[in-house]
Amino acid sequence: QVQLVESGGGLVQPGGSLTLSCAASGSIVNDNIMGWFRQAPGQQRELVAVLGGDGAALYGASVKSRFTISRGDAKDTIRLQMNSLTPDDTGVYFCKLHTSQDDYWGQGTQVTVSS
């Protein structure tokens, strides 16, 4: 069984930075895509950033140039460096693992950008 555990959320002032981490455990195939999605209250879940096994990254339009997704030092971990945060970045951030067999989601971590 695959499990995803997110960490690093919290409260930050506008203009600040946060780093989220996600660690996947269980039976994970090598060829996978990991990434982040977020959901603000009353809104649909949206793409933040995803990272393929080949290192190719795809970003949502609203975060491009401010956020950076990368592989962690440990296997099957990813990080999301978030800079220049604005109140519009507030929401629950979910880690996702996509494989040829299934999709897996973490429980989510809250990010709140407020002064």
Image: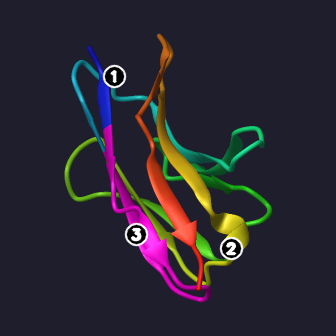
**Is the Cβ of the residue at disc 3 closer than 8 Å to that at disc 2?**
no
Q: Secondary structure at mark 2?
A: helix
Q: Residues within 10 Å of mark 1 (few under 14, many from 20)?
A: few
Q: Which residues, given as a range, are shown in magenta? A: 5-22
Q: Secondary structure at mark 1?
A: loop
| Residue matched to label 2 | 87
Expressed as whole percent of the image width and height from the top left, the position of residue 79 reads: 39, 59
Q: Secondary structure at mark 3?
A: strand
Q: Residues within 10 Å of mark 2 (few under 14, many from 20)?
A: some
| Mark closest to the chain's N terminus, 3 or 1 | 3
> Residue 14 is drawn in which quadrant?
bottom right
Residue 59 visible in image: yes
Expressed as whole percent of the image width and height from the top left, the position of residue 5 reads: 30, 40
Expressed as whole percent of the image width and height from the top left, the position of residue 27 reads: 24, 18
Q: Label 1 amino acid? A: Val
Helix, strand or loop: magenta stretch: strand
**Which residue appears at 19% of the width and 51% of the height?**
74
Q: Label 2 amino acid? A: Pro
| Most foreground residue, 72 or 91 | 91
**Which residue appears at 50% of the width and 42% of the height?**
94
| Mark closest to the chain's N terminus, 3 or 2 | 3
Q: Which mark is residue 19?
A: 3
**Which residue appears at 47% of the width and 55% of the height?**
110
